[in-house]
Every structure is written in C-alpha cells, then in structure tokens.
Amino acid sequence: METGFCSWVLAVTMCCWLLLLSRVCSGGNLNGVGKVRGVNLGGWLVVEGWIKPSLFDGIPNGDMLDGTQVQFKSMALQKYVSAENGGGQAVTVDRDVPLSWETFRLWRVSETEFQFRSLGGQFLTCDAEGDSVTATAESPSMKETFSVERNSDNRIHIKLKSGTYLQATLANQLTADYPGKPGWDDNMATFEMIIVVNNLHGDYQLANGYGHDKAKEALTEHRNNFIKQEDFIFLYRHGINTVRIPVGWWIAQDPNPPPPFIGGSLAALDNAFSWAQMYDIRCIIDLHAAPGSQNGMEHSSSRDGSVDWPRYPDYISQSLDVIDFLASRYANHPALLGIELLNEPSASSVPLDVLISYYSKGYQIVRKYSSSAYVIICQRIGNADPLELYRANIGFSNIVVDLHYYNLFDPFFINMSAVDNIDFIFKSRQTQLQVLNKANGPLVFIGEWVNEWNVMSGSQVDYQNFGRAQLEVYDTASFGWAYWTLKNDRKHWDFEWNIKKKYLQLGDSSKQKISSGAWWFALAYWCLNSHYIY
C-alpha cells in the first residue's frame, strides 16, 4: 500500500514535470505542418437535434416546438382553417385541401401557450371575446397568444387568455365565442391538429422548450461531456491537425445571453482552445448561427424557418460585433488558425451584394487584431457559383473560401450507385477543385464533407472506397478539409465511429508531424487518468 502510494506520487510528479516541459518544447505551428486535416465539432456549442436527439427527450409537448408547422381541421365542418392570401386578412374555415395558406408556424410561449404565424409572417390575433380571428398582427403580444388543450387523438381546443374558446361557425369564420367548455366530440370548438413539419431542433427550440432552468441543466451536462479533452487526444493520434468549431452569435454575450439562449458556450470554447494547444491542434471558429438566421435551418438557430439576417441591418451589425468579440479574444492565442465569418448563407435569401459587403467588413475586423489569422468565407448554399466569391476581392491575404461537399440533400444523388458516387467525386468534385485551386484568389477549403450517401445497401468496402476517393480528391484542396462531424447519433456521420470501425481509412494522406511536446502531453494525461495496482 505504501509502495503503491509512493509510486503514484512519483508518477504524478513526473507527469507534472512533463507537462511543464512540454509547454516549452511544443511548437504547434500549423503553417509549418501542412494543409488542414480537420474535423468539425458539430452539435456541441450549436445544437442540432439530429446529431444528439436525446437532448430533446424531456421537453413536454416536444412535437410542438418553435417552428413546427401545423394545420387545423374543424371536426364539425370538416374544413381547414385558412389565412386568406397567406396572411394580412381574415381567417376562414372553408378549405377542403390544406396547402400553404392553411399551414401555420408555432411560436411557443409555454408548454400549453402558442402564437400562430401565417405564411406571410402575420400572426393570428383576436381583440376580445366575441370577435373574429384575423391574420393581421405583424408582431405577437397577449392578443396573439392562445392556450391549446390537446387530447391523445391530437384533437385540440384553442382559447383566449381570458378562457373563451374559439369555434368554427356555419358562416365559415373562426370566432372567440363558444359557450362554455367543449367536449372532445365533433363540436364547433374541436379541431384536429395535423403536424406537417417538425424539423427544427436547434438552440432556440431546446431552450424555449425546456425553459431556462431545465435548459441550463441539459446544456451544461451536454457541453461538459459531448466534447472532452480525450477527444483531442483521439484526433491528435489520428493525424488531425485542426478542429472547426461552430458557435452561435449569443456567445459574445456570455455568460448572460438574451433569452432563451443559455450561457456557458464561451467557457467551453476556451477549453477547446486549451486542449488544442496541448496537442498541436489548431482551431477555426465558425459563426454557425447568426442573429435572425442566415438560412432558416436549425443549425442557424432559426426560430421558425424564417431568414431574417439579410433583411435587417441590425442583425448584420450584430454579427460583425460577434466577429470583433471573437477576434479580439483569440487573435493572439497560439491555437487560432482562422475565423469563419458565416456558415452556409442561403443563396435564395441572402443577396450576393449584402453578403460580400458583410464579408469585406468582417475581413477588416479580423485584420484589425491579426495579420496572420485566416479569414474564411463560406459559399452560399443552393444555386450559387463558388467563383462569385473569387471575383469579389474581399481581402488581400490569408483568405479562404469554404465549400461544403455532400453527396446528399439533392435529388441528383438519390438513384446513384456506389460506383456512380465515386465517379462523381473524381469527375465533378475534382474538376471544380482544379479550377478553384488555379484561380487567382482565396485558398480552397472543403469545410464540411461526410462518408455518407444515399446508397442503401453499401458494404463496408463500398464505404471504404467512397471515403478513399473523397480523401484523395479533397486532399488536393489548397487549404485542406474538415469532416462533419466528430460525434453523431448517425453512425456514418460520426468520425470517431468511422475510424474505429474502419469504414473511413485515413491512410498516409492525413498524417502530420507530431511534436515531442504533444507526445508528452498525451503521456502526462494518460498517467494522470490511469489507475495502477502495485
């Protein structure tokens, strides 16, 4: 026992000495190592429900989160509630077939209280008991907040804050004057609620769904355990030299961001930088979620699928403030490689001139703090030509264009075989990279890609060949690549699972020179976290 204790003390003392020595010895300069061989830390500091669905398991009425699209069918009339012309006018109960005018997006106020947004953006409103419901409110308040009672058959009653129930009338109107409390039969106040789309599971939905206290508990546990120091050891051991870390705009106001967002992501990002420095890994900070949402998706923290970021100058100014905050905080940190100004702006919603103006200002902000940090600008998603960013003359040094390559999300890939997918990588992706690499301008970064496709019967060998083809082609990108993502509930999206199960074989292409300092860190960490029996 005494000998074991002395040995343990000696091991700890040696490890601490090695840690101190390694701080002096480790260089960790990516520019001296080569291209980026990276992995994204997706689903960590910006929540994406599909990456870790269990985060949402405890939310009551979890299928009625912000942004859920619903339709209401009168059980008495067998007609659907409709906002005439998509909003701005009366609400009727007269449609036999539900389409866009009959679809409403939820804004969740509490577990049982909601606001209903029409296609045109207006909210259902009712001035008082006895009045008709219209879709004319530009912003929601008490008059636009309704209580929803729901039974197991997805039948609902809707009532005002005063307690008066809404009902369909024989004149096909929706009015707040049902007498008394309705039952669940086919009466005028009973509607069937059809959930059309429930695909937004981001930070907004999680925090607003749980409420502040429970959301803080859930997110604190998630941030502390989803990504940890040993994950950086795993990445380092497999030759990964960079992590791309998605963050949300609210990180700049940590530890007390505006509701419903929950503080704590800034401390987690600080931890990531510390771990990265230990293992000669560099960090790209990626503004993944901008205020107002730049693409309407859950990973941009959209509340209801709307894309308001390009429409309001205040949102763009606020985004630039976030870039200023991140650049000023991390510019001199030895682990910083670059800052990505915005993730996946929508081509259909974000005008190119608005985006270029934002990118140019963001570039200048980063340069204010660092002459060497890379400034990364992401291609618009959708129907957009990556060359549009090469023609924009956004910056003069250390600028990178980020492309996201997925053989998914497009009907083009649905019927492709394994061979077809691999041929597409070599014929289409490789050709585009060759053109961009030769272009006079930014470096090329494949900031997101994954070893997954629409091939339903792919064997392990098929996946290995697909992964090998992507690595071979993406290795030619002048800046490098980053896999999406380190951990994921879906196995083939999970980098760690792919490596351990040998579905993705990195080979020699992504090996990097490992510094002696990083080796000492790994050894020290192993010693400090191992238990010996003497």
Image (cartoon, rainbow, N blue to C red):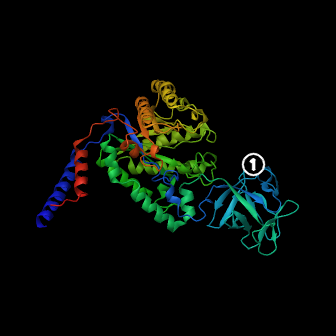
Can residue 253 be seen by looking at this rendering?
Answer: yes
What residue sits 29% from the left and 49% below the top?
278
Task: Return the x and y of residue 170 as percentages of the image width and height.
Answer: 88, 62
Residue drawn at the location 56% of the way across and 54% of the way down = 201
Find numbered disc 1 in the image and state the secondary structure of the residue it sits on.
loop
Name the kind of residue labelled 1 in the image. Leu
Write the residue at 57% across / 31% down: 385
Q: Nearer the viewer, residue 204 or 95?
A: 95
Q: Nearer the viewer, residue 126 or 360?
A: 126
Q: Position of residue 337 (x, y in %)?
A: 38, 42
- The answer to whether residue 411 is left or right of residue 78 is left
According to the picture, the residue beneath numbered tag 1 turns out to be 99
- What residue is drawn where x is 46% and y is 65%? 217
Which of the image's four quarters has the N terminus? bottom left
Side (left or right) of 168 relative to 15: right
Most foreground residue, 182 or 245: 182
